[in-house]
Image (tube, coloured by chain):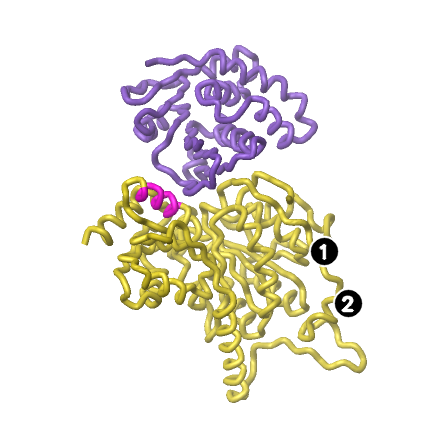
Amino acid sequence: MGELKLMKGNEALAEAAIRAGADAYFGYPITPQSEVIEYLMAEKPWERTGMVVLQAESEVAAINMVYGAAGAGKKVMTSSSSPGISLKQEGLSYIAGSELPCVYANVVRGGPGLGTIQPSQADYFQSTKGGGHGDYRQIVLAPASVQEMSDFVKLGFELAFKYRIAVLILSDGVIGQMMEKVELFDPIPRMTDEEITAKYPWATTGKKKGTQRRIITSLDLDSHKMEEHNHHLQEKYRIISENEVRYELIDCDDAEYIFVAYGSSARIAQKAVQLARAKGIKAGLFRLISLFPFPGKEMAALCKKGVKGWLAVEMSAGQMVEDVMLSVKGCAKVGHFGRYGGIVHSPEEVLHAMEEKIIGE
Amino acid sequence: MTEEMIIAGFGGQGVLSMGKILAYSGIMQDQEVSWMPSYGPEMRGGTANVVVIVSDERISSPVLTVFDTAIILNQQSMDKFEKSVKPGGVLIYDPNGITHHPERKDIIIYQIEGARLASEMGNAKIFNMVVLGAYLKVKPVVQVENVIKGLKKSLPERYHKLIPMNEDALNMGMNNVVKLN
């Protein structure tokens, strides 16, 4: 068993970056995720593993540092909260176009604009439908516990390098700020430059005599080539959609009414399931772990087993609910409930919404 | 066993660290724990609260609106959270600075004069440990030895000399909590 600690979600994410063998973290502080860079600065990973930690002059600078380091085959990470993530979108589009691996976290707060510093899940569209320009996708993992804040950094780097893609850990103010027991995984050593050069034929580690030039770019003025590149990207996203779907079913075996939720809303909905069961309502929870790829096929299959209604629970005005509707294709009623603007819904409110909007009609 | 509680008071009273010590003690006895603080403007403006859950099972929501126990340490928190205690639940408060005492008849109410006792012991900073002692007397969700074990594990070595004083404060709280109804 790994080391047990009591940590905030943000701290677990930061510690996991060091343990995952990350070469660098570039960031800029913003509530409610500032503990990530605070923890890294206090922990001095450059003394532990040689990992670089740098507070950039802005979020835009930080994501472009990630772009550069990723191009050199380095394990690199950044994190921010909603307004800061918006600033990073240009860089993320370039990273997608250049097919580079990286992990980044968004500890979501209420918006739009500067909004509030309290928790929210209103960045679902931006996260899953492409926040930057161009036809691209990124893998989106939604941790619902401090444990997953740690585990998904390790998993995120594995997926990022497997598919040469950005992996977003989509957290929120609740998961970032709360403390829970976390079992830390054993440290993975950082790769040497020689190992990177040998393992990643695309990484720009310096051209040696007799070797091919390695070029990282998202630009190709030949549209036919660019279309071909886009075909390749789409094929990659299709493969990811087939192989990397992640979700958890809680009390769904006999469930007639199912909450769909991710992150902190999934925890709250899990409590609503308990409250519902105590009242004799056969409720269950479909917890999304990967938001892209979305477990739509699995949702549709479950729907056919006698589900009478779905309630999408998210701290937004209704974003994920669109994907639920597209997935179950009218097989059962789909509704939405969520507080937003920084207000976190209570388990009682969530259950009440299921009773009013789905069961009642 | 699942204990869902809130600790609420002023920033600086040690509300958040009291919750942290409790959570850490839960880990020491292999329980699941969660600690969800208020953060941001609320905290900066004076009031601080933390929801702590200690359970033998996987914890669902870390965010709650009703509680088995509320520990209330100022009037604003009394106004806000007296009504949030589940019927049959427990409210523990320090009467220092309280102008409107709790009135509910369907919950069990305890008083601990934490501020007075801590200052009589010569250290206002151990206030939160006195209150924690009172709580553990009423609700022994974690054992005192595991609180001490947790302190030893979570505090840097240079602070270990303060542990006996904290233990005294816990005992002071345990011996002086008063049931009011």
Vertical comparison of A65 with A206: above or below: above
Q: Nearer the viewer, residue B58 or A316?
A: B58
**Most foreground residue, B63 or A239:** A239
Query: Who is closer to the viewer here, A282 or B92?
Result: A282
Q: Position of residue B63 (x, y in %)?
A: 40, 40
Residue B167 visible somewhere in the drawing: yes
Q: Which residue is painted at 35% across and 13% down in the image? A: B180
Residue at the outermost left position: A361
In the image, the chain rendered in purple is B
To which residue does mark 2 refer?
A194
Quarter of image, res B1:
top left
Magenta segment includes B54: no
Q: Is residue B129 above or below residue A112?
A: above
Task: Return the x and y of residue A9 as percentages of the image width and height.
Answer: 53, 46
Q: Which residue is mark 1?
A: A189
Do callouts 1 and 2 point to residues on the same chain?
yes
Which is the main secondary structure of the residues drawn in magenta? helix
Disc 2 residue type (three-letter): Glu
* x 34%, y 44%: residue: A272
Say which amino acid is labelled 1.
Answer: Pro
Q: Provide the letter of the chain coloured yellow.
A: A
Protein chain holding label 1:
A
Q: Secondary structure at mark 1?
A: loop
Q: Say whether residue A272 is magenta.
A: yes
| Residue B48 can be seen in this image | no
Q: Which residues are magenta?
A: A268-277
Q: Chain of mark 2?
A: A
Give the image location of residue A4, x and y in percent. Answer: 61, 40
Q: CA distance from mark 1 to mark 2?
A: 14 Å
Tell me: A26 left or right of A117. Answer: right
Residue A262 disc label = none
In the rendered image, the quadrant that contains the C terminus of chain A is bottom left
